[in-house]
Image: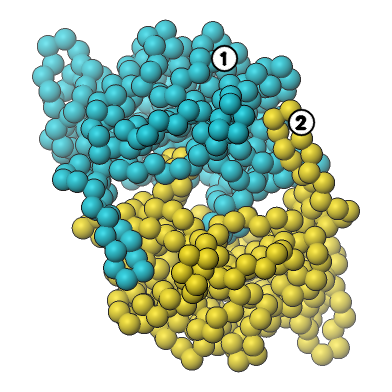
Chain colours: A yellow, B cyan
């Protein structure tokens, strides 16, 4: 059965084709182990701190100094940033064309001092440090009124856009709201309730797409998945901003991150994968209806011409088939 | 200098960073030659016609029969289609979720009988046959009132979504309009003129992003390029539908296709690449302002977490730098 499903968050159609039913091993994209990552000098390894801009945050062993060995998680400005948090946003026009200066902030979270550990291999304490670093940087960037949207994301493997092997994630503060989650305030305006809360309820009632239900979070494969084996972690508590995470939620989110990434590695033979954190705009006029959530996207297919042109994704694995596989590999 | 530019066609922001200035050889994505394409049985090779559904169109040598050796270009239904042109479009709702049946049509254009020829290596007569096949199938699909949008596209290389080595392109008839080009009728409504005509004028006046000016078409690197070295071929004549191509335009478009793909192969060492044809919706209420054009997108970077999450592309090569390189390689 092939269906075209509506994604109400992104206001898009997605083609979901259970009949194509690609098995995990049928995908053409190479697994992370089989990709050559440029070896040699790694600017993210301990001892090479001077190769990066000075850190803006770090968790470290007792007695360790800044920008020196002994750190456990280290956050630095992205050396090759397209953005600079300088001056004010100036919009200009040249004939037909409108542009503004690249106002913003781009940072890198080095997730571990150990070069050879993949994200899913990090222990729970380390995961908690990473989530804590995300939250601290989110809240720090939100203090700057020029920043309107904060995107946290990770690229693992070449087919997910990673160019360095050493495990890291990134955070960008944009001077505008990209608008990809505009479906959320729109739904609230129309129905007076939160789309994410409502769909969480429906998913728990049906159970066919849920992967794991925790105390604070639920993992599920979303109805209109753009990517095969896409999985969301949704906070049960209606919270607009990622930065509103409580200590108990931080702890459980770290546990979910470890479980999901491990399940993906086992079920799909370590594919390239992203995670992204979708959240509410900051320093913007208040609109109700946002509810932050985290999205894990294995990258088993490349967005082809049809996706580039139309924005309509053709996904050969229905989330009803993806959820059982991830469940089966949960806790491995 | 880093800028955030507005794409008025797609109503998106793009970050364009001339200061990062990646050279063609600096991109991490592998070139087509270095990617292993599964060898073995090819369903697109002459003699294997029975491995595919019966052809819907072909150009053949004199005396050759259908679904048999002797064809020069062959169009077949996609065997693994997510779409079927059967019955009517039925929209349904399950709780929160809205979906419809996968009504539509998905076809494959096998561009040459020769397995080992890349698209840019085909001769001009062959290119003309391909463009002619595109036009014929576009106009044939447009006859079916259930089809609302027709997308023609090509995936070359693994990083552009190709899974078979034998050169081919694809055409999908969608039962809805994806809306990626909504900026065009919107601009017309606001200003009473065509955005593509207006920007063509501005580009020709400035010349900094034009690659080649022909009698019927202009090749240019668009102001808000999402992809590094992205290049558009824009018809000078204000034409809404690709299917309205005249015989003279067909001929010149074939020539442009050969020149651009050859320039991309030379300038960028045969990268993965798509082309897509953006056109007006069909069988839909008339809206003025559409103007079809063709988009060539080298895939030197993978859409990473930030693009997946926000839809904002970070492009390290300004089109003002891309155009001179493609110009330099024009006619090679």
Give the secondary structure at mark 2: strand
Residues packed near mark 1 inside 10 Å, few (<14), some (14 to 19) or many (20 plus): few
Instruction: Count neighbours of disc 2 (C-alpha within 10 A) and say few if under 14, some if 14 to 19, many if 20 or more.
Output: few
- Say left or right for A35 vs A73: left
Q: Is residue A220 left or right of residue A3?
A: right
Give the left or right position of residue B288, taking residue A287 as reference: left
Tell me the distance, in whole angstroms, between the alpha carbons under discs 2 and 1.
31 Å
- Disc 2 versus disc 1: nearer the observer: 2
Give the chain of mark 1. Answer: B
Question: Is residue B315 positioned above or below B66 on the image?
Answer: below
**Quarter-of-image position of residue A282:** bottom right
Q: Quadrant of residue B177?
A: top left
Q: Where B315 falls versus B210 (above or below)? A: below
Q: Position of residue B221 (x, y in %)?
A: 62, 28
Tell me the quarter of the image containing the N terminus of chain B.
top right
Position in image of residue A23 (x %, y %) = 29, 62
Position above or below: A96 against B15: above
Numbered label attached to residue A94: 2
Question: Label 1: which residue?
Answer: B331
Residue A21 shows up from this direction:
no
Q: Chain of mark 2?
A: A
Residue A43 drawn at (x, y percent): 75, 62
């Amino acid at each position: 059965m092939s269906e075209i499903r509506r994604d109400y968050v992104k206001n898009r159609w997605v083609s979901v084709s259970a009949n194509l039913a690609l098995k995990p091993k049928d995908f053409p994209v190479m697994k992370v182990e089989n990709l050559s990552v440029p070896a040699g000098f790694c600017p993210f390894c301990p001892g090479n701190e001077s190769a990066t801009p000075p850190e803006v945050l770090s968790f470290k062993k007792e007695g360790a100094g800044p920008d020196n060995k002994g750190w456990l998680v280290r956050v630095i400005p992205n050396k090759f940033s397209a953005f600079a948090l300088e001056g004010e946003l100036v919009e200009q026009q040249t004939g037909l064309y409108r542009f503004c200066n690249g106002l913003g902030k781009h940072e890198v979270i080095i997730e571990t001092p150990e070069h050879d550990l993949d994200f899913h291999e990090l222990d729970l304490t380390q995961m908690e440090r990473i989530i804590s670093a995300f939250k601290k940087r989110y809240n720090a960037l939100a203090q700057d009124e020029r920043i309107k949207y904060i995107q946290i994301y990770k690229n693992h493997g070449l087919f997910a856009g990673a160019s360095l092997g050493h495990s890291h994630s990134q955070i960008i503060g944009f001077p505008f709201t990209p608008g990809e989650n505009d479906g959320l305030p729109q739904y609230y305006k129309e129905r007076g309730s939160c789309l994410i809360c409502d769909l969480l309820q429906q998913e728990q009632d049906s159970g066919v797409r849920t992967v794991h239900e925790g105390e604070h979070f639920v993992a599920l494969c979303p109805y209109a998945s753009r990517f095969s084996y896409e999985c969301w972690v949704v906070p049960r508590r209606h919270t607009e901003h990622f930065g509103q995470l409580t200590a108990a939620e931080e702890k459980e989110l770290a546990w979910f991150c470890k479980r999901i990434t491990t399940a993906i590695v086992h079920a799909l033979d370590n594919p390239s994968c992203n995670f992204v954190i979708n959240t509410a705009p900051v320093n913007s006029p208040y609109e109700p209806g946002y509810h932050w959530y985290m999205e894990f996207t294995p990258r088993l297919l490349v967005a082809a011409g049809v996706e580039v042109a139309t924005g309509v994704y053709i996904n050969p694995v229905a989330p009803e088939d993806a959820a059982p596989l991830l469940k089966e590999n949960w806790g491995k």
